[in-house]
Amino acid sequence: MTSSERGEIEATVTRYFEGMRDADVDTLASAFRDDAGFYGFVGDDLYAGPIAHLYDWVAANLTPGASGPDFKLEFQSVEQHGPIASVTCRELGFVGHDLLEYFTLLKANGSWKITSKLFAAL
């Protein structure tokens, strides 16, 4: 993987993070394919479905900065093979939770987009 490809992949996941941090659904949506999905647990609560459900949740539950003052993203690994990639990261301090996240990405029409988000609270 070239440093340029890695940078583009990380920039896509960072747009996701910025959308969550800023409660900005447009920024959040710019990181995902329209047909993406998300799946995961916070405690016993399962969150699953098309990515539009995440956008609806953000719009209804977050305001800029509501994610928390210590909210940050740490990349653990980035792997890429041709037009596919996977990213493992930790999202720390999100409304009182630390999350382990797995993202899959696809490069189509010259840009990387997230195809799925899988997560669990630590």
Image (tube, rainbow, N blue to C red):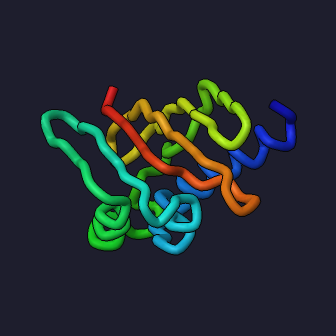
Q: Compared with residue 44, is residue 19 higher up or lower down, i.e. above or below?
A: below
Quarter of the image for the N terminus: give it: top right
Question: Is 42 on the left or on the right of 107, as rendered?
Answer: left
Along the line of sight, which residue is nearer the eye, 19 or 35? 35
* Tally of numbered discs: 0
Identity of the residue drawn at 49% across and 45% down:
71
Question: Is 27 on the left or on the right of 38, as rendered?
Answer: right
Q: Quadrant of residue 63?
A: bottom left
Identity of the residue drawn at 18% across and 42% down:
46
**Residue lying furthest left in this view?**
44
Along the line of sight, which residue is nearer the eye, 12 or 94? 12
Q: Compared with residue 91, is residue 66 higher up or lower down, i.e. above or below?
A: below
The percent coordinates of residue 81 (x first, y second) are 70, 31
Identity of the residue drawn at 42% across and 44% down:
117
Quarter of the image for the C terminus: give it: top left
Question: Is 67 on the left or on the right of 14, as rendered?
Answer: left
The percent coordinates of residue 32 (x first, y second) are 52, 59
Q: Compared with residue 13, is residue 6 higher up or lower down, i.e. above or below?
A: above
The percent coordinates of residue 20 (x first, y second) are 47, 58
Q: Quadrant of residue 77?
A: top right
Question: Is 82 on the left or on the right of 104, as rendered?
Answer: right
Identity of the residue drawn at 60% across and 25% down:
76
The percent coordinates of residue 78 (x first, y second) are 65, 30
